[in-house]
Image (cartoon, helix red, strand yellow):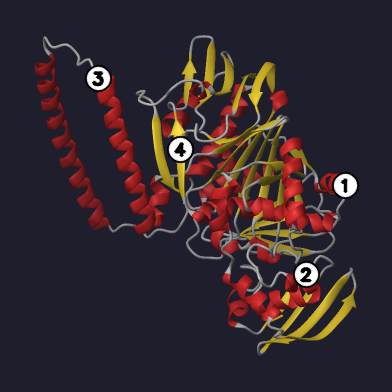
Amino acid sequence: MEVQLRYHRRSRVEQGPYRSTISLAPNLARERVFFDAELRDPLRLREALSALHEVVVSDLRFRRRDKSAYEAWKKRQSEATATLTRELLDASRVAAARELVGRALPPDLEALHAEKSRRYWGARATLARALLRDDPALFRALAPLDPVITVAPDVVFLEAFSRDESSYGCLYVDRESFVGAQEASLGTTNVDYSMALFERLQGLRTYRTTRFSIDPSGFDVDVEGRPEHREEKVELPASWLRGFGQISAVSDLATRDVPLEVSALYSILAFLGRHREKTGPRALVFELRPGKPTTIVIEPWGQRVEVRGSVYEGPKEEDVKVWGRRRLFALARLLPMIEGLEVRLVGTGLPSVWIAKMGELRFVLALSGWTANDWANSANLDLLAGTLLSDDAIVHDAARLLQVERSASARALAERLGVDERRLKGSLHRLAREGQITFDPVLGVHRFRQVLDPRALRHPLEEEPIELAKGKELYLGARVALERSDAIAGNKRWLSAKIAGERVEAIVDGDGLMTRARCSCHHFHVNGLRAGPCRHLLALRLTAFGGAELRLQAGSLGGGFIH
């Protein structure tokens, strides 16, 4: 998908002896969004934005180490290149100085600069398209996408994905953290981001008053042809869009909410910083025991970290493993400021959400099950949910109401719309998958936030996982021979069936969420439930919960199976 970005200048940090300004350049190709206010505590924001930066540049995918002979060759080449560069640079400076002696600057210098800039950004866009087509991994490493920022009535929040698309960071800044008058226009836009901006942010100090500004000036002037004007068309990976939609899926799944002490996270990061595992397993094991403090085991060393000061209040005893733990180093700079910490676990090998509360700031770090299991491709969180279907009328009404109210809980939305909350969830999840809303896990509300123009999102987000599509085909083709459906303790049901030659069993709750399952197919043998239910389990669940509603939509299955 081709997305247009237009910035009238670069984002920057302007510093004077008594005042600093964080001035972010919004995307002029989107709606007019601006904000301007003075920060109460600039250091907190500096550290939080630095943590978000760690998420943006994070790429922990496995790479083989280079051989020693290659390293020696590279060193020799580097020294030769450095020597040649110095010689050529000195020669070019001398030649340029001779040409400029006694000569005035050309009158059309700005026009020439603008033309060269257009050529440069055009070549860059062409290169980006070629990389995306021929080498997507290199494209993501060289061209991380600009963060998304939203101005809401109560908060300003920034969202970003890591380069490897396995980590998602969101920084919420309460509007109460700003002092004095605030100028704002609500909405969502991209903001220009660069390494230079990150480096300038490190210069923020408490002895200088600091303003935070999303600069609206580019909307009011003709920026075409100006030296700092930048316009490009980026080939946006569909996986990036699907990833934003998958994030909200975690909020509707049953999670284990585990309160943590900051000292526990510090102990984990300190231990991982001193030790490097050479063999597996490489998991963090949460030993959850109702009424007792949580213990976290760092494998493979068996190092135990006990979470003091709180007890686990979940319903049952279990162990939950999560991988890709080194991504937690994104939170390292926040440790001195964290006042409350919580992790929400979906299950073994499934995503986890780490929530750091820092007074008027909140940082949400969502991690996929492991580093190679990114949000968009492997996690398939929508497969783990129930079988509620979206309703076009409810989707339309919920979107319009959230656009006006900007945020609301599912219960409040259900009451305002006069619909059952369980029916509403499917429509909210569809809006989340289409990038129209997001879920705030701290306040428990859905927020109106359009990642991109909804007309541009329709095509890539209609692509369904193959297991989901095949599961619908089995259900609609009457290939499910349901043998047993018995009520068991805890308002759950035990289902047993034979589907397309496979033996299938599952325990599901009232919403169709699978807590335990078994299937004789190859997909389940390899993945279990970590990559979502197989097609046979999905067909079984549809038989028990989907019913006639899906059969009525048999002619148009795309985008309908959501919880």
Name the residue located 54 percent from the left edge and 57 percent from the top edge.
Answer: 459
Name the residue located 69 percent from the left edge and 74 percent from the top edge.
Answer: 538
Is residue 175 shown above or below 547? above
Q: Is residue 496 left or right of residue 297?
A: right
Instruction: Tell me which numbered mark, 4 or 2, is placed earlier along the sequence.
Output: 4
Which residue is denoted by mark 3 in the rendering?
109
Q: Are marks 3 and 1 in contact (CB under 8 Å)?
A: no
Which residue is denoted by mark 1 in the rendering?
415
Packing grade of label 4 (10 A; few <14, some 14-19, many >=20) is: some
**Which amino acid type corresponds to the residue marked 2 in the rendered image?**
Glu
| Whether residue 324 is visible | no
Is residue 132 shown above or below 20? below
Q: Is residue 470 left or right of residue 442?
A: left
Q: Are marks 1 and 2 in contact (CB under 8 Å)?
A: no
Q: Which mark, by number, is residue 519?
A: none
Instruction: Tell me which numbered mark, 4 or 1, is placed earlier along the sequence.
Output: 4
Q: Is residue 337 left or right of residue 547?
A: left
In which quarter of the view is residue 477 placed? bottom right
Q: Where is residue 423 shown, x and y percent of the image? A: 81, 58
